[in-house]
Amino acid sequence: QWKNNSTKDVGDRQIQAAIVHQLAEKGNFSHHRGLMAFKNYDQLNSCCEACTRSQGCRMWSIPGEIDECELYFDRIEDDIDFWDSDMGKHLGRDRTYSYAQQKVSDFPVARRRLGSRNDRRKLAMNRNEINLPTWPKLGVPDSFGYPREEPVLDFIGCGWSNLKSFESPCHYPSDDLIFGSGKRIEITVDSKDQIADVSIASKVEEKKACSVEDESFGNGRWVKYPFPDDSVCMPVERDLDNGGFSTYMPKYNGTSMPPFCWHRDNIDRCCNVCGEMGCRFIVTHRWVSDLRQSGKWFGRWENYDCFYDDLSSAEIQQCIDRKNISNIEVKGASVKQMLNRYIEQKLNGIQMVKPTAFSRNIVLDTLEMPHVVWHDAVKEFGNKLDAYGEINNETSEYYFVTGFYFSSEREPHVVVDRSLQFSNLAWKKLTPKGYKMINAFDVTAAFTYDSDAQNDGLHITGPPIRAILTKFFHHLCQE
């Protein structure tokens, strides 16, 4: 819901600010303030969403007086930083919850308070008062609109979610804490369920081989094994030969190493490189489990009822030759880049057959998740899936990867519930037409805080990507 009020030939900041004030006066909005997010790819939809989620927001405009987005209100909220046109100053700046007063050393003992008051905080956006940048190319507001009159989703959290935070970037760890009753419980493990201290190579599988029908949700878990000796897998070195998402990845050679060596990782070295402005404020205050604190990781995803084969380079080559495969194509967007990086490592030295009328083309498709979760309504995504044609498994095989287990709202609407909803819809609509599902939702859950690129809770790399591709090659090469 927006209207064009284009005056792009005017670029003077004073005129820009004057138009914002004029819009406020025209609508009888006595208070307005800006929203500055450090990553805002879709300004129009994000600004509209911010207004819809903000209590009392009546209108929005792009750009704002000084920020990317301006929100307009007709009443004062005590704990929100508003520009009061009558008083000629910002209200709320006498509060004691500013960026400078938040110390990580206080965490988790001290929790942010509203000055001396003990009121429950309202969740709302606030102008970034620390190092506020200028936006010389914003021009004057050329779009404005009104909040949607419908129920909205609320993500209560910090990290990459800018829409409902006290400052941008919102990064203080206590904002994400969930407080319980304080009661403690003790978890015991029955002796028959304990994992013996044996290598992954000596584990004897007594289950059947997994089929694509076993890719159901909630059917499996991660199993950690002792880290293999260097004499078995050779010392861990960083692989600098593969492109894709800029993050740590150990070297792997499927010819000179046993295939299970592929699952080695140093979780503490993963995902510390920032590709987005402002990410540096997040990665130093990330949530982590003992997986990241311990550093070295070696384990695999195991189904409760069946097993997945780890294939060596020789076994993959035999599979390529036996099934007459001329091409393995990865489709999608950002997650595709991550998959490509690992699949290139796994296929290093593998030769595809010469393309002919009888050779097979294999597709691994992410369905452009999470981008469709961000932009599409459920019905719209369903219509896209309906357009997928039938698959002739004699000449091709088409695998699709489900959405991941998200732990943030890096973009509006990109949350874990919708990821599962979209994944279930894809399974329902595509599998009857011959498409084969790879369950990535479950395998990413355990690593969503530890191996997510840039700590965005969205691009979960490392061990889960290997698990996804282990499943893929297992299903592809099953007789």
Image (spheres, rainbow, N blue to C red):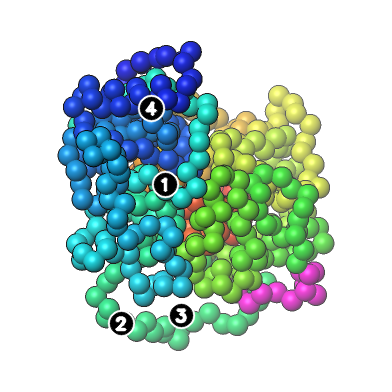
Label 1, on which residue? 128
Please rate how many residues cluster around mark 2, counting C-alpha atoms within 10 Å: few if below 14, some from 14 to 19, many from 20.
few
Q: Nearer the viewer, residue 333 or 273?
A: 273
Relative to 38, residue 443 above or below: below
Q: Which x, y percent locates residue 30?
A: 21, 33
**What's the distance in space between the residues labelled 2 and 1, CA to CA?**
39 Å
Q: CA distance from mark 1 to mark 4?
A: 17 Å
Q: Quadrant of residue 231?
A: bottom right
Q: Residue furthest front?
A: 87
Say which of marks 4 and 3 sits in front.
4
Q: Which residue is under mark 4? A: 17
The CA distance from mark 4 to mark 3 is: 66 Å
Residue at 29% across, 22% down: 22
For this rendering, which residue is in front, 351 or 456? 456
Element class at badge 2: loop
Q: Residue 184, which numbered label?
A: 2
Reply yes or no: does residue 226 show up in magenta. yes
Report the quarter where the N terminus lies: top left
The x, y position of residue 439, in whole percent, is 48, 50
Tell me whether circle 3 and circle 2 mark residues in contact (CB < 8 Å): no
Q: Amino acid at mark 4?
A: Ala
Q: Which residues are magenta?
A: 223-235
Q: Tell me which numbered mark, 4 or 3, is placed earlier along the sequence.
A: 4
Counting residues from the start of the chain, the first of labels 2 and 1 encountered is 1
- Work out whether mark 2 precedes mark 4 in sequence or the reverse, and give the earlier one: 4
Q: Amino acid at mark 2?
A: Arg
Which residue is labeled 3 in the image? Answer: 193
Q: Examine the structure image and report whether residue 72 is included in the region drawn in magenta.
A: no
Whichever of callouts 3 and 2 sits on the residue coming sooner in the sequence is 2
Residues at marks 2 and 1 touching, judged by CB atoms closer than 8 Å: no
